[in-house]
Amino acid sequence: MGVVTKSIKLKSKGETDIIDITQQVAEYLAGSKVKDGLVTVFVSGSTGALTTIEYEPGLVQDLKDAFEILAPRKGEYQHNLRWQDGNGYSHVRAALLGPCLSVPFSNKKMHLGTWQQIVFIDFDNRPRSRELVVQILGE
């Protein structure tokens, strides 16, 4: 059993910036000595999240629009009243998806669907520098 830990450093625009990280994760798998197992990606911080989507402009916009309905920017949030930082919606959106995603792999290839990509979403209300942890576990 082996474990490999890497990181992906990103600069995001914030405001539900959706970034495809599939290629970086695949490159880490290809370069590791682990052939079969599970790869997990994790974001530290409470305003970022991970999921999978078909990464194409129409769906990227649809996802942004859906989050605006679920947790609107201009909504009233107790977090904003307490901290006055205006990003209460960011925390709620990130909590709906969660900070990590795991994908099984065999022969160093992730078991993703044909049109499925791994994306990081930065919900914060300002540009950010982010570091994602990629952990590969297997044999």
Image (cartoon, rainbow, N blue to C red):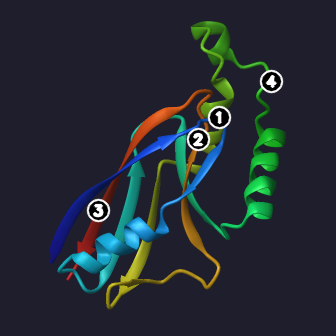
Rounded to the nearest angstrom, the CA distance separating label 4 from label 1 is 11 Å
With respect to residue 25, does 62 lie above or below? above
Q: Decide if residue 111 is on the left or right side of residue 87.
A: left
The C terminus - image quarter: bottom left
SS label for mark 3 = strand
> Tag 1 or tag 4, which sits nearer the N-term?
4
> Tag 3 or tag 2, which sits nearer the N-term?
2
Q: Which residue is mark 3?
A: 135
Q: Nearer the viewer, residue 30 or 45?
A: 30
Q: Which residue is mark 2?
A: 95
Residue at 39%, 68% in the rendered image: 25
Q: Which residue is the extreme one toward the bottom? A: 107
Q: Amino acid at mark 3?
A: Gln
Q: Nearer the viewer, residue 28 or 90?
A: 28
Residue at 32%, 85% in the rendered image: 108
Q: Residues within 10 Å of mark 4 (few under 14, many from 20)?
A: few
Q: Which residue is mark 4?
A: 75
Q: Are marks 1 and 2 in contact (CB under 8 Å)?
A: yes
Q: Which residue is mark 1?
A: 92
> Tag 4 or tag 2, which sits nearer the N-term?
4
Image location (x, y in percent) of residue 133: 33, 52
Q: Amino acid at mark 1?
A: Val
> Tag 1 or tag 3, which sits nearer the N-term?
1
Q: Amino acid at mark 4?
A: Gly
> Tag 3 or tag 4, which sits nearer the N-term?
4
Image location (x, y in percent) of residue 70: 79, 41
